[in-house]
Amino acid sequence: MDRDALMLSLRLAAWTVIILLPLGILFGRILAWRPFRGKPLVEALLALPLVLPPTVLGYYLLVAFGSASPLGQLYERITGSPLVFTFGGLLLASVIFNLPFAIQPMQRAFETVSQEVRDAAACCGLSRWRTLWRIELPIAWPGVLSALVLTFAHTLGEFGVVLMVGGNIPGETRTIAVAIYDRVQAFDERGAAVMSATLLIVCLIAIGATYFTGARLDRRRHG
């Protein structure tokens, strides 16, 4: 069992969730309620990671993060280290390929909040921030929670983008998915089986906790 790879994957998933929580709420809320020109194009771009092969997305991210790109050069000037094949680059790639897993469920959740409820909150003198915190989020919370768990589980299992952008550096970019691939390549079936079972259990617990929490919230709401 490669504990370093497991801990790195959990750290990557946790930071991805932390970053995408406010971004998902912001963009999910905007896409749910604000019509604007080009909205279908924005939604299509956000959905691209769902349909693009991971190696294709990983290739484009590798080019975008490379030392020849403006982003890669800017990052290297600021930090003194390259963006590719580092945990920072891996985290940025993780945020990008998880955008649809975070934003789409939150968008659908905010769409369930009726305009009448928001108008009533405004009539009661609630600011936009207090309306979001006290009215909208409690209603949309099951969708927000589902988005976070999907993001967490997807990050743990992602392989193609991780390998393209992060490579296979122990303690830096070798995630548990990459470690499983290494064990299979080395014909270590037992090691691959143990890590695969561990990943399966962690994802199952995360998804099960989501359904359990969602069921409790529904009972409270209708109880």
Image: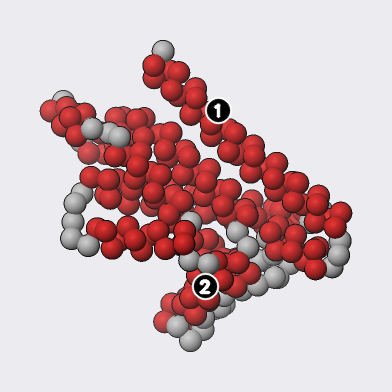
In the image, taking residue 195 as reference, residue 203 lies left or right, namely left
The total number of labels drawn is 2
Q: Residue furthest left?
A: 123
In screen coordinates, is 47 left or right of 39? right
Which image quadrant: the C terminus?
top left
Nearer-N-terminus badge (1/2): 2
Type of amino acid at the residue the image marks with label 1: Phe
Q: CA distance from mark 1 to mark 2?
A: 36 Å
Where residue 57 appears, as percent x and y from the top left, is 50, 70
Residue 212: mark: 1
Q: Quadrant of residue 109?
A: top left
Which residue is labeled 2 in the image?
56
> In the image, what residue occupies the spot 75% across and 46% down?
197
Please name which of the two marks, 1 or 2, marks the residue nearer to the observer.
2
Residue at position x 22%, y 39% in the image: 128
Query: What amino acid is found at the position of numbered circle 2 in the picture?
Result: Val
**Labels 1 & 2 near each other (Cβ < 8 A):** no
Locate residue 71, reporting x and y percent.
43, 77
